[in-house]
Each structure stands twice: as C-alpha cells, then as structure tokens.
Amino acid sequence: MGRKTLAPGAMKPCGDPAHASAFRFKSRGRTMSFNLSELLADRDGENFQLHTKYLNPQMAKVIKTLGFDRFYERGDGCYLYDEHGTSYLDLLSGFGVFALGRSHPVVRDALHQALDADLPNMVQMDCALLPGLLAEQLVTRSPDQIERVYFCNSGAEAVEASIKFARSHTGRQRICYHAHAYHGLTMGALSVNGSSDFKKGFGEMLPGATEIPFGDVEALRNEIRRGDVAAFIMEPIQGKGVYELDGEVWRSLETACHEADVLFICDEVQTGIGRTGKFYAFEHYGLRPDIITVSKALSGGYVPVGAMLTSDKIFRSVYSSMDRAMVHSTTFKGNQLAMVAGLATLSVFDDEGIVSHAAAMGDLWHKKLGQLNDSHEYVNAVRGRGQMIGIEFGAPTTPALKRRWRAVEATRTAMFTQTLVVPLFQRHRILTQVAADNVNIIKLLPALIAGEREIDMFVDALDELLNDAEKNSAWIFGFGVAMAKGAFKRTRSSANASPAQS
Ligand SMILES: Cc1ncc(COP(=O)(O)O)c(C=O)c1O
C-alpha cells in the first residue's frame, strides 16, 4: 500500500501511515528507536482530533465548548505554558496531584536516578526495599493505630481495598457513606458515591451501600443499630463543594462507629498529604480512623499511586495465612517508580515545610477572599482549609442584582459560576473548576507551593469579574445564553458542563 502524501500545510488525518515515522527504527541497536521530541513535533496540534477519534469525544467537545482548548507544551510549578509560551495559572493542579507544583526538580531528579539505576522493578516473587521504605514513611507520619500499608495505583483502588478490608475484618456487609460523597468511580467506590448522576446507567451497586445525610449522627446510629454495618467511609472535607463539618459532629460520627466496632474510614485521597494544612485533614478534628486512604499528592505528579493504611489487626484479617498472602493484590502495587516519586515527594515536604506553608496560605486565602465576600453580594461563603478552597455564590439581595442572577440561572442551574470560570480562563488565564454538578461553587486546588502572588492573581481577577457582573456587562448574559443554546442542551438536573470529577 502506497503512503499517502499531504498537501503542504494540510492537517494529517489520524491513522495516516505518515504518523508511523517517529516510531520507525533508526538503527538495529536496542535503543534510540523511539524519539519523543520528534513524535511530539510531528503530531503537534492534533490532540483534539485524536481525542475525538480515539478517546472520549464528549470530553473533547466539553473542553472546546468552554473555550479551554489549548495545546500545553510545558508545566512548571503553579503554571502551564501553551505552544505560544503563554502562561496559565493552574488552580486545579491535576485535581490535587501536583502538590509540589509541576516538574519539581527533586522528584524529577529522583526518577531520573531510578531509571538510570535499572532497578529490578516488580519482581513479584520478592519483597523489594522501596515499598518498605515508603510504607515506613507513611506509617511514621500516621497516628499510632496505623501500622501497615497496602499499595495500589489510584484513589479509587485504595477505596476498594478499604471496603474489602472492612468487610473482611468485621464479617459484615454494609458500608455507610455521606450524601454528596466522592470516593472514585470503580464499582465499589461508585457504590459509596453520593451523587445519583454518576451511578445512572451502571446497574446494581454494591449490596448494602447506604447513604446518610451529611453530618447526620442519628441517621448513622440508626443504620449501625441494625448490626450489619462494616464501615462508615467519609472525606474529612468533601471534595464536591468543599463542605465541612464541626469537629464535634465528626467526633460524634466516629464515636457512633467505634461504640459498635464499625470501622471509621477516612478517605484522604484528596485532603491528605498536606492539602488542608495538616498532613491528614482528620487531624483538624482530632479523629482516630481505622483506615486511611491516600493517593494524589503522593505521586509527586509523576507516577500514579494509591495506598490504604490500617492497623496490623485489620490487615491480618485479610492476609490471615500464607495461603491468603495474595488474596488482595494488584500487579503494579509498589512499583518502584511510584515508590521513588513518593519518597522524593515526602522528603521535599520535610525540606520545604510544605504542610505549614499550605496552612499559612489557607489563612491568606480566607483573608483575601473574605474581603471579596464583604464587597460583593454575589459571594455567599468562603470555605475550606489550607490550599483547598470553595467559594460559593448566591442570589444577591439588591433587587437589580437579584434580577440579573435569576436571568443567568434561568438559562441553566449553576450557570452563574460557569460564567465566571470561563472568563477566568479566557481573560485572565486562570484554570479553575465548578466544584460539583449544579452548584454555584468554584473550587480551588492549587499546588501546595502556591503563594501570595498566585492568591492575588486569582482574587484580583475574580474581583474584576464580579464588578463586571454587578455592572451587568453583556458578556455574562451573552455567555449564559450561548451556553444554554449551544452544545449543552441538557436538562437542568443533568451533569454540569464543566466536568467536576473530584
Ligand atoms: C476523596 C476521593 N477519594 C477517591 C478519589 C478517587 O481517586 P482516583 O480518581 O485516583 O480514582 C478521589 C478523586 O478525586 C477523591 O477525591
């Protein structure tokens, strides 16, 4: 078959054999057959075309409709850079993955060292050193009752492990969870998801998964009284909406569990490893979890990893004999690049005082956003801790502003916040997200290293946009109407235009 030739300047169609060039062997030796920079240069700008053809076409549509379509070439610290060298302040940090910012030199160097050392990765019938070292680090940073670690590859997988371990340890089936909870999207984790939108279309959930209203101690007690609850899983600060509970409520929920030997699982996949200004967010409330799940930040932003931490007793209820040594496992557990990324990340946390910096920045966020709250009627509340911040918008009381709010919201629920998120990106080059489906909340998850400069950039931009909104500038309505008429022709109860995964 002859090779297709392209007219000068024409976009190469996906799947064209011309694309094989960057993969072709250049020598018969074992190295240098693959040239990444050549491949990237060769296919520059085809990202949306490829996603539309081979990956999730709806996602490509969403990104384009929002006008978020860029071709990013580089990430450094709190910023992304597109092919024109334009910088974007990233306040999502990969949904909380880039705690140390993008391309942290220490983590990057550690990974180079690991690759150059030709480590004997995943021997499987072996007990490698690096998982032991990372487990030791995590246990050392955890409360006394936490003695052992199970490594996996993602947050959802850590949650799956927590469900299985809780069932195994208690011999009971049911798992209780909070309304609006988000614990991942694999089948077990989905079963304890507090949003019906995510569950729709996927059939039967895990038997015995039971939702309780957020912070409702009596509802949890009622479920526990039935005698068949294995565990209650919760996020110390809910990712979807950045909702918090008082320490007293948390302690009552924990007591309700512990009085009945029900396991108390703290899902720290998002809040853990410094995000909220403590190593674990449950420390804010003086809680004593039986199981902790972590993931995102531990990766250093490079290698997927998840971990479930628990007591020796709970661990041994699963791994109860040599016969059962692999009864819960996964091929890539403790893979060495992930372990190196985790160890390097924790060492940077210590060297650079990342957790205390996150706490200090939390105070600054609240101070500066508090001023916006005082000066703009559209701002209803500022929530969160450390570098996990939610800004909730709501109907103003001044009649003229209230009418504008209603007009925008009439086009689609939570459209007001969407009309802020889009110009924040397009006008101010700041990447943010709507915190959850159909809520008027912007969620900020900057890199933990973000400082006053980044906080000021966001606060000044939001201030300007809210001033515009108050002056009834045309763009806010123009955008709302365009969105409502455009690709997002969905019912008011359907998922939000902006994918609010975590
Ligand atoms: C609290 C919490 N648990 C679990 C998960 C799932 O993690 P992953 O997306 O790595 O599966 C997330 C993801 O955002 C999360 O925020």
Image (cartoon, rainbow, N blue to C red):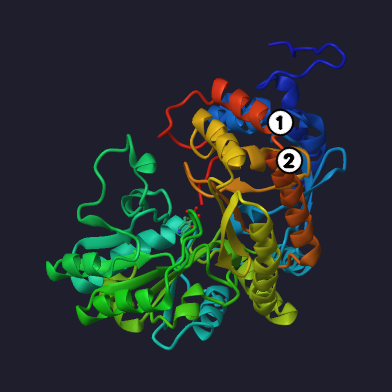
What residue type is disc 2 on? Asp
Q: Are marks 1 and 2 in contact (CB under 8 Å)?
A: yes
Foreground mark, 1 or 2? Answer: 2
Instruction: Please tell me whether mark 2 sits on a helix, a strand or a loop.
Output: helix
Q: Which residue is mark 2?
A: 468
Screen quadrant of the N terminus: top right
Q: At which x and y percent is residue 395? A: 53, 45
Give the quarter of the image for residue 161: bottom left
Specify which label sits upstream in the sequence, 1 or 2.
2
State the residue lying farthest toward the front. 399
Rendered position, 20 above or below 426: above
Q: Which residue is mark 1?
A: 475
**How many numbered marks does the figure carry?**
2
Residue at the left extreme? 226
The answer to whether the beta carbon of the residue marked 2 is less than 8 Å from any atom of ligand 1 is no
The picture quadrant where one finds residue 189 is bottom left
